Image (cartoon, rainbow, N blue to C red):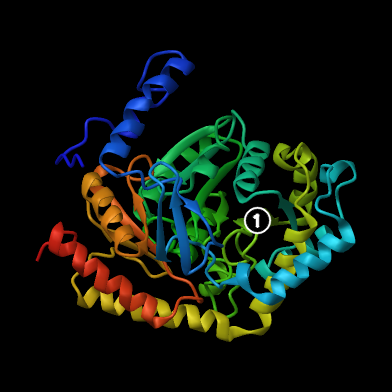
Amino acid sequence: MKNPKTETYTLKDFTLQTLQTDAMDRATQFKKWITQSDENDHAIYWLEAQTAVKPEMILYDSRNGKMWNVISFISNDYLGMSQRPETKEAGIKAVMEYGTGACAAPIIGGYLDIHKQLEQEIADFTGQEDALIFSSGFGSNVGVLNAMLGKDDIAFVDFQIHTSAIDGLHKTNVKRVGHNNLEYLEIALKNERHKYKTAMLIIDGVYSQDGDIAPLPEIITLCKKYNTLVFLDDAHGMGTMGENGRGTAELFNVLGQVDIITGTFSKSFGAIGGYVACSKDLANYLRYHANTTVFSAAITPQATCSILKALELIKKDKSIRQKLWDNVYYLKKRLIEEGFDIGNSVSPIFPIMVRDAYKVKEATRILKEQGIYTLGITYPAVTNKDARLRVSILASHEKQHLDKLIQTLNYVNTIINIKKAS
């Protein structure tokens, strides 16, 4: 097996901006990267799961016919809702009553009574007046932002926000601000806000790569001072953060003070779909102007009812979330004791900083061979100097899973150094 110290090609070499050629030739040339990944046994993406995505999985790689029994740390099913009997039974019942799909956009007949119920319950849970659901979390961000911001407006964006929000900003002006940097944010608001009709700050509640959180109270204060809307993508915070799992706003005791909250049902709720929670007037506007719902089929009945059941469990059974945080605190303590660099994580997301893309791929390969499935995060998600292993912790993990992870990371470190410098 070829194992060079460096790699010739990166994904960046084949982007629309980098490779100045036609689309089909660009796809043909991309075979160079695919071949390099195969030769180095660094094909760490698009592996086929032979089981549900849960703490213990079976993986299959069709390129070489290999199978692995692994302990998995790649899922965002933080509360284990996708595998609970209650959520499965609710979904089965919905299929029998409503069928496998609404098969129409909500605006033209695909809007079911259970969709309305979910919107009302999400609005209440997030502390907002109303809510609108979408068929994906990605679609909720793109649809809302495309509908709200145009050429006379500006979006101030934390540079670590999710790609789905970035993709919703192509019609408007964009000003990037330093990550969680309140001083830089105020300078930007002071210098730029007055030039535009609508100004909006776009942040995540819990950031998906570093696992840190936004300083929400201070952000709200600044944005009120400069008449700027706060758009909070709380995909990773909803269900995990706050005394009752009501998200980052509850954690900071500012429920009802955020202008717009978006999120996904594919994480703590264990299903698929997305939502925006906001004022009643804005929700009604978006029902007719957010193209990702107006021109998209409605979320399936099964997903809707499974989400409703998950929300019920989140509200009534705090022990599920407590198990998650017991696991988070245990793993954080162990990783720090063993000398791994986990940055500023205060969530179920652990970035194990390696800071070298090749090492990340090698570490991911060795971990997989030793029965641990993690994500290797490199470009384009992060820069090479920020390359890391990303570990997600779930309520459904057991202590022996976490101990095996620590043991295997230490084994990897004997082969290639992945611990922080002493």
Q: Residue 390: name its quadrant.
A: bottom left
Question: As drawn, is 371 to the left or to the right of 255?
Answer: left
Q: Residue at x 80, y 40 (%)?
A: 288
Q: Residue 309: name its quadrant.
A: bottom right
> In the structure shown, which secondary structural element does the residue marked by tag 1 occupy?
loop
Question: As drawn, is 17 to the left or to the right of 131?
Answer: left
Q: Nearer the viewer, residue 266 or 168?
A: 266
Relative to residue 123, is residue 102 depicted above or below? above
Q: Which residue is mark 1?
A: 272
Q: Nearer the viewer, residue 126 or 394?
A: 394
Q: Can residue 72 be seen from the camera position used here?
A: no
Q: Quadrant of the C terminus?
A: bottom left
**Residue 244 % position (x, y):** 60, 79
Q: Residue at x 76, y 60 (%)?
A: 302
Residue pushed farthest front? 65
Amino acid type shown at disc 1 = Ile
Q: Can residue 373 be seen from the camera position used here?
A: yes
Residue pushed farthest left? 422
Question: As drawn, is 358 to the left or to the right of 293?
Answer: left
Q: Quadrant of the N terminus?
A: top left
Q: Residue at x 13, y 64 (%)?
A: 414
Q: Nearer the viewer, residue 121 or 219?
A: 121
Tally the numbered discs: 1
Local packing at callout 1 (Cα closer than 10 Å; few below 14, some 14-19, many 20+) is many
Q: Residue at x 62, y 51 (%)?
A: 137
